[in-house]
Image (spheres, helix red, strand yellow):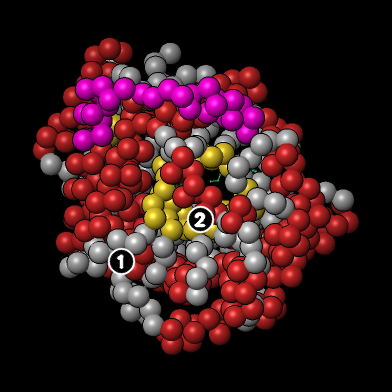
């Protein structure tokens, strides 16, 4: 396997596809030509890419939950409940953890146990085991655009089955579904396997079927600096575009300081446009997704609604194309459909109250946008250099060198040298920049911001601040002030 950021030929792809479709018996239900025809009959209003473009043109911020249960009928009921009671604009199918680890036998057990128990004993929808026929029952019973949301390092068979079944959007990427989701799966492996997924979607595009792709923006969802997640997002966008993907949503996980979060979305849009154009991908439609707070949540449901509302407000003021919604059960586990719908309605109310307002371009906001862009450019340009002009190769070398580094990542391939912490206003800064290739003025900016907080709190900037910040929101605050 030679890793190269180069579009695969049909022969290269088909040689691997034959083997991928044998990973589970339901793979034999995939018939590409038949699937293309099936997609041609999916109406525009149930088409993810088209709905996103419409939202972007109308300046809408669409709402989307996470949701998935073991059995098909229950999953259909859940999704229709979230559409009808939750007013969700876009719907997911969150895939279960066994399927994410390609443990289809265990997923099958989970289905059988759920049937016996009369309730879902899996933490998501086991789409591979249900196969094209079973998943099509969901597609034909839910009148909304459907996206596959998961966390799968090897997502090739899952992609083949769900896209053939009529899903019109696929989340994930070779970095963003490895570093936060796996311990010892090599980046070469997952970047290569995700080139397969992107090439598959490029193949549908060649046949007139436009499937949306969404790299997973938040990464570990714990104090990830905007420039770190943006660098990964832009790289995964470029890797997808190289394989022929034409409709891409780049994502970002809320940090909590409003100016920084708005700046992050603005910077992401500008960086994505800049780098896609720079590398010749001029026919790729780009949208953004804002994830409501991905870190620890308060157990108290009223406080959880506060966190959800804050994420909704930031997404609306940032004018993100869509927002991924949390629920008041976040601190407890898989939400009930009622709790999930409440999170959606809370978010919808905030978006509706803010859609006629806009956040002014203040000096502070401008500084934040420029800082995020400067930092992200330092990282992206270093990755490109390390790869001698190849972002796939460059990414592997960048993680080895700590040029790309994701805080609190389970993967042994992330150096975990950087240390993020909040500044005195709650914006996420770097207490330790690790080996990130920042210019001296950027390093100084972060140092000054951390010292400003240290002075205000009367304590040295330290690792203790990092720990205090990790627990702050679940304890009812944003900045982890000393007790
Ligand atoms: C990045 C994913 C983490 C988030 O994904 C939510 N999540 C996971 N699985 C399900 C599910 N089956 N139904 C509703 N939400 C789900 C968690 O709560 C967490 O917020």
Task: Tell me what residue is drawn at x 33 percent, y 26 percent.
Answer: 259
| Quarter the N terminus occupies | bottom left
- Pointer 2: what residue? 49
Q: Is residue 99 visible?
A: no
Query: At numbered mark 2, what does the secondary structure look like: helix, strand or loop?
Result: helix
Quarter of the rendered structure image containing ligand 1: top right
Q: Which residue occupies the foreground of this view, 298 or 168?
A: 168
Q: Is residue 220 left or right of residue 348?
A: left
User: Compared with residue 4, is residue 60 higher up or lower down, i.e. above or below?
Assistant: above
User: Compared with residue 88, is residue 177 higher up or lower down, i.e. above or below?
Assistant: below
Residue 180: horizontal and vertical position, in percent?
A: 45, 51
Quarter residue 453 falls in: top left
Residue 322: horizontal and vertical position, in percent?
A: 50, 41
Query: At numbered mark 1, what does the secondary structure look like: helix, strand or loop?
Result: helix
The tag on residue 392 is 1
Of callouts 1 and 2, the N-terminal one? 2
Disc 1 packing (10 Å; few <14; some 14–19; many ≥20): many
Disc 2 packing (10 Å; few <14; some 14–19; many ≥20): many
Q: Is residue 130 left or right of residue 370?
A: right
What stretch of residues is rendered in magenta? 344-371
């Amino acid at each position: 396997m030679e890793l190269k950021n180069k579009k695969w030929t049909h022969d290269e792809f088909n040689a691997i596809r034959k083997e991928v479709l044998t990973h589970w018996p339901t793979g034999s239900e995939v018939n590409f030509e038949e699937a293309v025809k099936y997609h041609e009959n999916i109406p525009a209003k149930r088409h993810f890419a088209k709905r996103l473009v419409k939202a972007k043109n109308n300046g809408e911020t669409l709402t989307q939950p996470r949701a998935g249960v073991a059995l098909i009928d229950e999953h259909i009921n859940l999704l229709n409940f979230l559409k009808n009671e939750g007013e969700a604009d876009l719907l997911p199918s969150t895939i279960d953890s066994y399927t994410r680890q390609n443990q289809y036998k265990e997923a099958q057990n989970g289905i059988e146990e759920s049937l016996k128990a009369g309730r879902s004993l899996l933490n998501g929808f086991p789409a591979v085991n249900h196969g094209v026929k079973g998943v099509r029952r969901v597609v034909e019973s839910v009148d909304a655009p459907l996206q596959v949301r998961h966390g799968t390092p090897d997502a090739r068979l899952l992609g083949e089955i769900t896209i053939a079944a009529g899903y019109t959007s696929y989340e994930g990427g070779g970095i963003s579904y490895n570093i936060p989701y796996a311990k010892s799966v090599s980046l070469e492996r997952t970047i290569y396997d995700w080139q397969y997924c992107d090439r598959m979607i490029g193949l549908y595009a060649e046949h007139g079927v436009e499937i949306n792709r969404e790299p997973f923006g938040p990464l570990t969802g714990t104090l990830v600096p905007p420039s770190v997640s943006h660098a990964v997002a832009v790289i995964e966008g470029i890797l997808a575009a190289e394989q022929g993907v034409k409709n891409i949503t780049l994502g970002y996980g809320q940090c909590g300081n409003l100016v920084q979060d708005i700046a992050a979305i603005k910077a992401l849009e500008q960086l994505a446009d800049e780098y896609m154009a720079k590398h010749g991908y001029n026919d790729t439609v780009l949208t953004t997704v804002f994830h409501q707070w991905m870190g620890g949540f308060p157990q108290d449901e009223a406080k959880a609604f506060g966190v959800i509302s804050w994420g909704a407000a930031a997404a609306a003021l940032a004018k993100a194309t869509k927002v991924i919604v949390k629920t008041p059960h976040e601190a407890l586990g898989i939400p009930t459909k009622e709790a999930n719908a409440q999170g959606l309605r809370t978010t919808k109310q905030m978006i509706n109250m803010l859609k006629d307002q806009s956040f002014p371009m203040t000096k502070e906001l401008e500084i934040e946008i420029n800082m995020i862009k400067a930092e992200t450019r330092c990282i992206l340009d270093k990755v490109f250099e390390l790869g001698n002009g190849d972002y796939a190769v460059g990414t592997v070398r960048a993680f080895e060198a700590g040029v790309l580094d994701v805080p609190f990542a389970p993967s042994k391939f992330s150096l975990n040298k950087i240390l993020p912490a909040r500044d005195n206003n709650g914006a996420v800064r770097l207490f330790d920049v690790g080996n990130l290739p920042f210019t001296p003025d950027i390093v100084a900016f972060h140092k000054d911001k951390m010292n400003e907080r240290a002075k205000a709190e009367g304590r040295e900037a330290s690792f203790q601040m990092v720990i205090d910040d990790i627990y702050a929101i679940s304890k009812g605050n944003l900045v982890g002030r000393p007790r």
